[in-house]
Image (tube, rainbow, N blue to C red):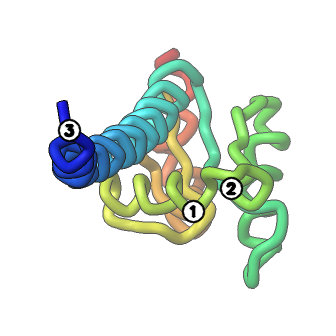
């Protein structure tokens, strides 16, 4: 095989290699998205109480209030602090896709989406939260 022919083969291989790299990158990002989605769903289904929160937020007391409500009820929620995770932004986007909100906190009890802090407060006042907790 002549050097001219080898050079043509090498040049022809470049687009194929680039395509393989792009496909590999897309596959990795799709896998990451799927793993974030799986994490969110698994957290919700595997824990009695889940709070997606931030250790800091513009409305810090709102997140704290949600955690305090469960503490007063002698319940221990599984808390996901989004600002302390590398995939926190992705989880927040997944919550937007899943429940239509990306604000924190987002509270789930026995797999049911309660909502944010105000929704949780209302569920306490009308007895819905206590019924959900008793159902487990």
Q: Is residue 52 left or right of residue 30?
A: right
Q: Which one is nearer the viewer's eye here, 38 or 70?
A: 38
Q: Residue 79, image x and y in percent?
A: 72, 41
Does dot 3 land on a helix, a strand or a loop?
Answer: loop
Q: Is residue 37 above or below residue 97?
A: above
Q: Residue at x 76, y 30 (%)?
A: 75
Q: Is residue 24 above or below residue 57?
A: above
Q: Residues within 10 Å of mark 3 (few under 14, many from 20)?
A: few
Residue, disc 2? 82
Q: Is residue 102 above or below residue 53?
A: below
Residue extending farthest bottom: 58
Q: Residue at x 53, y 41 (%)?
A: 129
Q: Are marks 1 and 3 in contact (CB under 8 Å)?
A: no
Q: Is residue 120 above or below residue 16?
A: below
Q: Are marks 1 and 2 in contact (CB under 8 Å)?
A: yes
Q: Which one is nearer the viewer's eye here, 89 or 124?
A: 89
Residue extending farthest front: 2
The span from disc 1 to disc 2 (Cα, nearest Å) is 7 Å
Residue, disc 3? 2
């Amino acid at each position: 095989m002549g050097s001219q022919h080898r050079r043509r083969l090498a040049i022809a291989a470049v687009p194929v290699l680039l395509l393989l790299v792009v496909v590999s990158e897309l596959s990795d990002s799709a896998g990451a998205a799927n793993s974030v989605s799986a994490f969110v769903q698994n957290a919700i289904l595997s824990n009695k109480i889940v709070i997606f929160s931030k250790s800091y937020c513009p409305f810090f007391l709102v997140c704290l209030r949600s955690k305090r409500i469960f503490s007063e009820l002698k319940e221990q929620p599984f808390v996901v602090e989004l600002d302390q995770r590398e995939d926190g932004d992705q989880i927040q986007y997944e919550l937007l896709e899943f429940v239509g909100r990306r604000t924190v906190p987002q509270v789930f009890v026995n797999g049911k989406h309660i909502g944010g802090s105000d929704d949780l407060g209302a569920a306490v006042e009308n007895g819905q939260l206590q019924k959900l907790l008793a159902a487990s």
